[in-house]
């Protein structure tokens, strides 16, 4: 009997699905996209309705050949890539390649990789959703037009090798504009006065000055604060009002992609890329002692908080058995869906509420466990009852001044029994001194029992009872990953599946850099952003980009034609591009004179633009090749930056002088410190021996002419061993291979694997 063929994206998912199905099924992996636009040219026929010219991706021919061969023998072919636009496009491309070789080709969607979900999907297969395909194709064509038409302009005007992206460049603009806000921010001084008070009942409590004779108090200087303190000398502090109110706190909805990325950044310090890579593994299947891998969470690219009735019913059982009926709402919680959300998807949730994190902890790597626990806790909290607090506000009068104390008492924890949503500390000035990355549970304070007209006294020990404190207003915070994702989401830039790649891309292109977890634009990022915004004000406008996202959603809903959408974008873009070719200022060859004298030839040096930004150069080039890095202060004064010398333990083989580390066009290398008298150089090794038997060389990092790093043997050309993936100087714990390698893909992110393909060992990157 002929088998049915199922085609998924990843080998890990293929292994998990194979476990659930009998001998009548064969599961193959396409390993992501099989076709795409060619890298060597635009690949879009603009004159023929922007028709894309897809080609088979290099290295994917062998996968396609196997799929075609097995499809000929199969009774049915089920195309089962991920349930999103990208997955739909992959299914469509595979169907095109099959070209009718199999009479029965179906599309199936696996929202979760469990036996029940897989068998149910196979019982009711569908067809390829061409509306989704057209939406993905429109996005791909738009991105290719912007990238391949703007990049040559940047090469010509700024620097060779640069690139622009339709969405990524808008993200850079957001970061640049935040930095401009910070630079333009005018700090304002203000003061607060806090009283430490003691009533008849303990404990002492703090109250802050709020009003004077019915008007809000604003203290701008220390002198004003001192005058108020003088007014309060000897004053009687009396409780004038007590207000107690019950406040309900609603549980958060289950995770959608953006919220998962934000919470993982706040609570776990994960990058968006790492979060998605770990979530992909949890979705595709993990070995947890159940005779094969098990998918632990539902599909992780979603913008819908919808939860199936079956999942809700299971959660109810677990909550009742673990916490009691008091933690269950009268009716199951249902959460509002965003306007553009895809209702076919569910929220990110555990595939089984009964599979609690502690039960699988021993089978999971540390970070996989932490992320799974985050998802499980959030889902369970979303199905629990709301919490109840008693909020108390107490006003204390003294000589016409009103001090206010607030406190909150938790009366019923509700959903907070398992989960409290994180906050970013820099969102409030009061918490700016704390860790800016993570906040744990809310800090709560309890006020003592007080009564109206009760007199309270000022506590003078150990600090003064009336404490003035100077403050300065703070500029808006730089974006960390959580805040940037929220900003992109709020402004409608990108979609759940794109946030991680956007953040990775703008860093890889060196338009922004991350310092202490916060993004700042580089000099290159500012220059490129300024030119793109000035000459393409519409294309890189935040609101315009958000409207484009909405139009892509309309294509998916069948409300808009994809060719018309691309045409409406292209025509004004092409006009702006032609004007920019003529009017955009070029940095190449531009020189700015300075008063800095070249110590080698005596000429005044000039500021030039190069591969690594602005630098000082001698105008006598090529006779004098002296260059220097520099900085400018606020007054415009130039300061020379001395290059630090990186020393090493190596000695020159020719003259015996120490070798120093230098950076060249193709990466780092060791050079004799006695240069130019001795010009000896040697590769900078990574401390990893070449795996080729009897070679005796070490692995070194190099770069191609286009700047792509690779790793090869130091004995080249005698030994031609080379790797694209970065080697890690750590033996494989599974097979004891001498080193591991780091692999990185746009979809799965970064992961560490064994160098030996036959081993199969993997861990989070």
Image (tube, grey):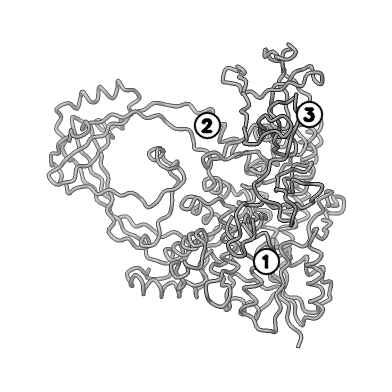
- Image quadrant occupied by the C terminus: bottom right
Q: Earlier in the sequence, mark 3 or mark 2?
A: 2
CA gap, disc 1 and disc 2: 44 Å
Q: Nearer the viewer, residue 632 or 194?
A: 632
Give the answer, above or below, for where 197 lies relative to 717.
Answer: above
- Residue 445 in sight from this viewpoint: yes
Residue 722 position within the rendered picture, expressed as x and y whole percent measured from the top left: 75, 52
Q: Nearer the viewer, residue 231 or 438?
A: 438
Within the image, what quadrant is residue 246 found in?
A: bottom left
Q: Tell which residue pokes out farthest to the right in this image.
A: 47
Which residue corresponds to the image point at 77% horizontal and 49% vertical from the top-left?
144
**What residue did someone put label 2 on?**
182
Classify mark 2: residues with Cα within 10 Å, few (<14), some (14-19) or many (20+).
Answer: some
Circle 2: element type: helix
Residue 82 position within the rendered picture, expressed as x and y whole percent measured from the top left: 66, 66
- Residue 534 in sight from this viewpoint: no
Give the answer, above or below, for where 672 lies relative to 548.
Answer: above
**What residue did someone put label 1 on?**
10
Which residue corresponds to the image point at 72% horizontal and 37% vertical from the top-left?
536
Mark 3 and mark 1 residues within 8 Å of each other at the beta carbon: no
**What residue did someone put label 3 on?**
583
Which residue corresponds to the image point at 77% horizontal and 40% vertical from the top-left?
150
Q: Nearer the viewer, mark 3 or mark 2?
A: 2
């Amino acid at each position: 009997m002929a088998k049915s063929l199922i085609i998924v994206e990843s080998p890990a998912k293929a292994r998990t699905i194979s476990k659930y199905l009998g001998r009548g099924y064969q599961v193959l992996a396409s390993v992501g996209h099989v076709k795409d636009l060619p890298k060597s040219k635009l690949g879009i026929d603009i004159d023929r309705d922007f028709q894309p010219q897809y080609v088979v991706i290099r290295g994917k021919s062998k996968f396609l050949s196997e799929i075609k061969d097995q499809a000929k023998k199969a009774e049915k072919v089920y195309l089962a890539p991920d349930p999103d636009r990208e997955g739909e496009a992959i299914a469509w491309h595979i169907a095109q390649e099959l070209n009718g070789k199999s009479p029965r080709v179906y599309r199936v969607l696996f929202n979760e990789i469990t036996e029940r979900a897989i068998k149910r999907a196979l019982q009711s297969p569908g067809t390829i959703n061409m509306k989704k395909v057209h939406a993905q194709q429109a996005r791909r064509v738009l991105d290719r037009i912007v990238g391949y038409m703007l990049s040559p302009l940047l090469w010509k005007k700024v620097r060779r090798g640069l690139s622009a992206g339709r969405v990524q460049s808008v993200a850079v603009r957001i970061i640049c504009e935040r930095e401009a806000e910070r630079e333009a921010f005018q700090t304002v001084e203000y003061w607060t006065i806090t009283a430490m008070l003691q009533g008849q009942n303990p404990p002492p409590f703090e109250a802050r000055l709020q009003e004077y004779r019915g008007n809000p108090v604003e203290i701008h200087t220390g002198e004003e604060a001192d005058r108020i303190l003088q007014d309060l000398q000897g004053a009687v502090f009396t409780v004038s009002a007590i207000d107690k109110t019950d406040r309900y706190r609603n549980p958060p909805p289950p995770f959608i992609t953006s919220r998962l990325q934000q919470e993982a950044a706040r609570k776990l310090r994960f990058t968006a890329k790492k979060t998605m890579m770990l979530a992909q593994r949890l979705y595709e299947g993990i070995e947890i002692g159940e005779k094969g891998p098990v998918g632990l969470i539902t599909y992780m690219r979603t913008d819908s908080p919808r939860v199936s009735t079956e999942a809700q019913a299971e959660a109810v059982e677990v909550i009742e058995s673990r916490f009691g009926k008091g933690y269950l709402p009268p009716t199951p919680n249902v959460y509002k869906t965003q306007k553009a959300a895809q209702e076919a998807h569910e929220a990110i949730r555990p595939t089984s509420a009964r599979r609690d994190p502690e039960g699988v902890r021993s089978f999971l790597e540390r970070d996989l466990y932490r992320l799974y626990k985050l998802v499980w806790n959030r889902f369970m909290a979303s199905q629990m009852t709301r919490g109840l607090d008693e909020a108390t506000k107490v006003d204390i009068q003294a000589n016409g001044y009103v001090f206010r104390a607030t406190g909150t008492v938790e009366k019923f924890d509700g959903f907070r029994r398992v989960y409290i949503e994180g906050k970013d500390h820099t969102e409030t000035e009061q918490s700016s001194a704390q860790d800016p990355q993570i906040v744990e549970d809310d800090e709560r304070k309890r006020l003592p029992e007080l009564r109206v007209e009760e007199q309270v006294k000022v506590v003078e020990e150990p600090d003064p009872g009336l404490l003035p404190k100077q403050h300065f207003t703070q500029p808006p915070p730089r974006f960390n990953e959580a805040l940037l994702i929220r900003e992109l989401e709020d402004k409608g830039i990108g979609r759940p599946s794109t946030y991680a790649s956007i953040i990775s891309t703008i860093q890889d292109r060196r338009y922004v850099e991350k310092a202490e977890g916060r993004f700042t634009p580089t000099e290159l990022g500012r220059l490129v952003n300024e030119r793109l915004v000035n000459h393409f004000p519409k294309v890189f406008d935040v609101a315009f980009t958000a409207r484009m996202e909405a139009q892509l959603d309309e294509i998916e809903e069948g409300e808009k034609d994809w060719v018309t959408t691309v045409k409406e974008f292209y025509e004004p873009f092409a006009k702006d591009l032609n004007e920019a070719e003529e009017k955009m200022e070029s940095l190449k060859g531009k020189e700015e004179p300075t008063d800095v004298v070249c110590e080698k030839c005596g000429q005044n040096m000039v500021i030039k633009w190069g591969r690594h930004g602005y630098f000082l150069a001698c105008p006598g080039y090529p006779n004098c090749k002296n260059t220097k890095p520099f900085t400018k202060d606020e007054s415009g004064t130039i300061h020379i930056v001395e290059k630090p010398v990186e020393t090493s333990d190596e000695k020159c083989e020719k003259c015996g002088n120490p070798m120093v580390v230098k950076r060249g066009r193709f990466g780092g290398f060791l050079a004799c410190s006695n240069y130019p008298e001795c010009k000896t150089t040697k590769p900078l090794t990574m401390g990893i021996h070449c795996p080729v038997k009897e070679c005796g060389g070490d692995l070194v990092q190099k770069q191609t002419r286009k700047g792509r790093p690779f790793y090869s043997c130091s004995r080249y050309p005698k030994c031609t061993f080379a790797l694209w993936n970065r080697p890690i100087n750590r033996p494989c714990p599974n097979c004891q291979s001498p080193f591991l390698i780091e692999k990185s893909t746009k979809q799965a992110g970064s992961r560490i694997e064994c160098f030996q393909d036959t081993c199969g060992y993997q861990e989070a990157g």
